[in-house]
Image (cartoon, rainbow, N blue to C red):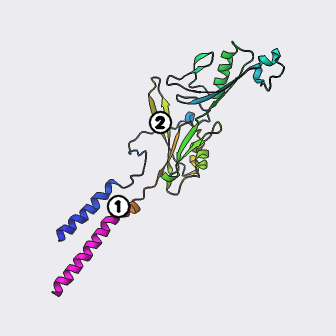
Amino acid sequence: MQKFFFGVGLLTLLLPGCNINKDLMFKTDREYQYAPLSDEELKAREYRIAVNDVLMFTLFTNKGKRLMEVTTGSNEEQRNINFGNFTFPVLADGYVNFPELGRVKVTDFTVIELQVELEKLYDALYNDTFVVIKVMNNRVIVFPGSGADARVIPIENNNVTVIEMLAAAGGIAQRGNAAKVKLIRRAFKQDGEVESKVYLMDLSTIEGIRFANMTVQSNDIIYVEPVPELGREILQELSPIISLLSGMGLLYTVFILRFRTN
């Protein structure tokens, strides 16, 4: 009987280990090489269009003058043209097939730069063109330190920072570790292959404000690493076995008492 209880106790200690902290994501070992947070990376920068973005495109002529209503059919009104609003996906090779222009490479342009480039191209076809481009799928995924509070937050403005995104998610959760905030950013190589850069930020001290002011990019992941709850999880894993042992101990006690009585 003693050997049996010893075996059960040993099993109790070994089994839970494989499930502890199973809810933690994006784990890195001690030797993991994070991407360096250089001064260049920390500078405020506008978003640059990337593969798989969805662009809303509108083209106006005559410096953006809108055609409000056609009533007289005059030549002046007919010359005011509004093409919009069209949406186009950025293809895997970085190109978009625009009306009348055909394929135009758009990746690595900011929105303003692409608008200026398209206006130059359309000026060969229309008078004083005015182009409006908007990226429709700008968003950041934020894990504030508690899995149930994860959010997908749209980027409404240019130059939105890490701290603004954390604030929009309600701040770092109680279980979150402010000293271990991971910014995961995808990048496309020349051959179209996707790679991920992982930056580690310490926002637990005032010196971390330089990291908190880093500009986010579309499809960034901000992951606040949760503090491991070893005690609670071990107790949770052991609860069924403790209940089993308690029941077995009670049966054993009853058996011994009845044996001695007889």
Image quadrant containing the N terminus: bottom left
Q: Which mark is residue 237?
A: 1
> Does residue 63 show up magenta in the picture?
no
Upstream in sequence: badge 1 or badge 2: 2
Q: Amino acid type of disc 1?
A: Glu
On the image, numbered disc 2 is attached to which residue?
197
Given residues 188 and 55, the one toward you in this image is 55
Q: Does residue 146 appear in the picture of this structure? A: no
**Label 1 packing within 10 angstroms: few (<14), some (14-19), many (20+):** some
User: In percent of the image, x 50 and y 50: which residue is there?
Assistant: 179
> Does residue 255 show up magenta in the picture?
yes
Q: Which residues are drawn in magenta?
A: 236-262
User: In percent of the image, x 54 and y 29: which residue is there?
Assistant: 50
The percent position of residue 113, horizontal first and vertical second, equals 65, 24
Q: Is residue 68 left or right of residue 38?
A: right
Please identify the quarter of the rendering in which residue 16 is found.
bottom left
Image quadrant containing the C terminus: bottom left
Q: Amino acid type of disc 2?
A: Lys
**Mark 1 vs mark 2, CA separation in Å:** 35 Å
Q: Is residue 251 left or right of residue 195?
A: left
User: In percent of the image, x 81 and y 18: which residue is there?
Assistant: 73
User: In percent of the image, x 24 and y 63: which residue is there?
Assistant: 10
Question: Please, what secondary structure does the residue beneath circle 1 have?
Answer: helix
Please identify the quarter of the rendering in which residue 32 is found.
top left
Q: Residue furthest top?
A: 124
Magenta-drawn stretch, dominant element (helix, strand or loop): helix
Rendered position, 179 above or below 48? below
Given residues 153 and 209, the one toward you in this image is 153
Q: Does residue 88 appear in the picture of this structure? A: yes
